[in-house]
Amino acid sequence: MRPSGRKTDQMRKVSFERNVSKHAEGSCLVKFGDTHVLCTASLEEKTPPWLRNSGKGWVTAEYGMLPRATGDRMKREAAAGKQGGRTQEIQRLIGRSLRAVIDLEALGEKQITVDCDVIQADGGTRTAAITGGWIALHDCLKWMEARNMIKLERVLKDHVAAISCGIFAGQSVIDLDYLEDSAAETDANFVMTGSGGIVEVQGTAEGKPFTRDELLGLLDLAAAGTAELVALQKQAIA
């Protein structure tokens, strides 16, 4: 039995609230159960120096957790003067995931930064950030299309979503909350496109190594979960 009482293949309640930021070109408040992440997409009419005059644009991401996103207050990383390794790893993952479905040449020499700020954490913050970040990115691109800057269908090639899966108490389960994540025997994150392509797989055995069959079982769970998330994305932007 899972601590939440959910079935092994049952995700938490997922919701997307668009246009939550007055100033951002695209924004979304995404909720995976008690994990809440504010995603904003900001457009700049320039590219990083190493992409100048290349004809290509860039999509990148930044990630952070607010001081009371967790049970105890965390110090802001800005106060420490540097980002932690976990933060850097997660924001690079978000950026890679979003770029996987963008035609950078069709975007042109512009940069979109997707900021993902965790308001409340209960496991799966990176997967929520990727899934909600896609909504914010989509809305930013729609904003650009409305101003004749791009053609959306040329720039945005597909949906992308992410979900966590793992082995908890000997069972393969989807969308781990904190209680499960902190005690899981195996913890994995899957990033997949709307057409079923795999963007990234992160999997770790916390104790006993997992088998090939167990990995394939987690992949099947993730494929069903990301398909459900993509369906929810489509409803949100309809």
Image (cartoon, grey):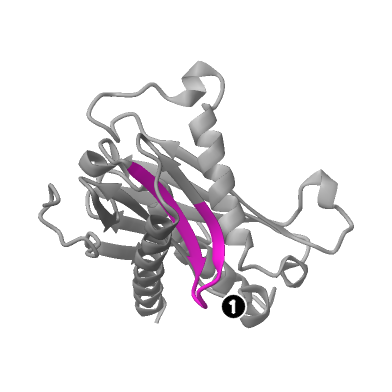
- Residue at point 27%, 32% (across, down): 70
As for residue 39 lying within the magenta part, the answer is no
Q: Is residue 4 left or right of residue 81?
A: left
Q: Residue at x 66, y 74 (%)?
A: 155
> Is residue 78 placed above or below 13 in the rendered structure?
above
The residue shown at (34%, 65%) is: 221
Residue 198, horizontal then vertical, whole percent: 54, 65
Q: Amino acid at mark 1?
A: Ala
Q: Which image quadrant is residue 213 in? A: bottom left
Q: Is residue 162 above or below residue 83?
A: below
Identity of the residue furthest to the top in this view:
80
Total residue callouts: 1
109 w.r.t. 186: above or below: below
Quadrant (top left, top right, bottom left, bottom right) of the C terminus = bottom left
Please provide percent x and percent y for residue 110.
Answer: 73, 59
Instruction: Please indicate whether residue 180 sits to the left or right of residue 154 in the image.
Output: left
Residue 233, image x and y in percent? 39, 72
Q: Main secondary structure of the magenta part?
A: strand
Q: Is residue 127 above or below residue 192?
A: above
Image location of residue 19, percent across then percent down: 40, 63
Can you identify the residue that label 1 sits on? 146
Does dot 1 land on a helix, a strand or a loop? helix
Residue 48 appears in the picture as rendered: yes
In magenta, the rendered stretch is 186-201
